[in-house]
Amino acid sequence: MNIDLIIQIIIGLISAFAVYNLIHYLFVTRPGRKRLALAQRIANEAVKTSINKLVDQKSLLPFDESDFKSEDIAEVWGRGVMAFEYHLPVNKVTDSIPVFKQALADALAEYGDAHHMHAHTDQADRPAFIVTDMWQLDDRVHFDVAYLINTTTIEYVDDLKRLH
């Protein structure tokens, strides 16, 4: 084979790889990150409002805003899953974890109702925000909240229910 042909093939493959990655980034990765960031801001507002309501109801003791953290867990469960992990100091929770989980789920459902946010599925309307898990690790109470804004997240929540 001609050395020039081999060099052209290598340059062509490198160019094709670069163009593919650029297109994938522009049309898949970047818009996905933007959707996830928007969903996280909306979920954070819902959770923060619900948590403040629980502080008013004495299910939680007042805490420093810097103690309230959130992280997306989409990379663990797959692209398009709008679920986020939050954690609070365990010494601020006045109820048992199951009671706190139910109180938070109720507060999130009320937030969704007040803001006309529901997940429309084949079965029925569901709350837009679901507490999917809650546990204690060291001095923190961790909980996951799913924002049922797309089919991927609804299927994720349904799969979790099948596991429990």
Image: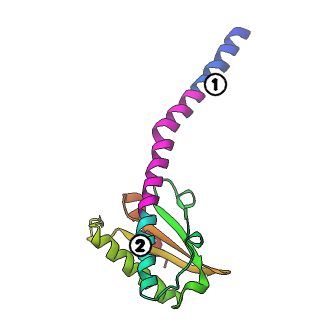
Image point 56% across, 56% down: which residue?
Answer: 75
Rounded to the nearest whole Å, what is the CA distance between mark 2 and mark 1?
50 Å
Assess whether residue 6 is covered by the magenta stretch: no
Q: How is the image coloured?
A: rainbow
Which residue matches tag 2?
49
Characterize the local packing of mark 2: few (<14), some (14-19) or many (20 or more) Cα atoms within 10 angstroms.
some
| Marked residue nearer the N-terminal end (2 or 1) | 1
Name the element at disc 2: helix
Which residue matches tag 1?
14
* Residue 6, placed above or below residue 161: above
Q: Amino acid at mark 1?
A: Ile
Assess whether residue 31 is covered by the magenta stretch: yes
Q: Amino acid at mark 2?
A: Thr
Which mark is nearer the camera, 2 or 1?
2
* Residue 70, placed above or below residue 12: below
Give the x, y percent position of residue 157.
43, 69
Q: Is residue 158 visible?
A: no
Image point 45% across, 38% down: which residue?
Answer: 27
Q: Is residue 61 visible?
A: yes
**Where are the magenta residues, as a range?**
18-42
**Most common secondary structure along the magenta stretch:** helix
Give the x, y percent position of residue 107.
38, 79
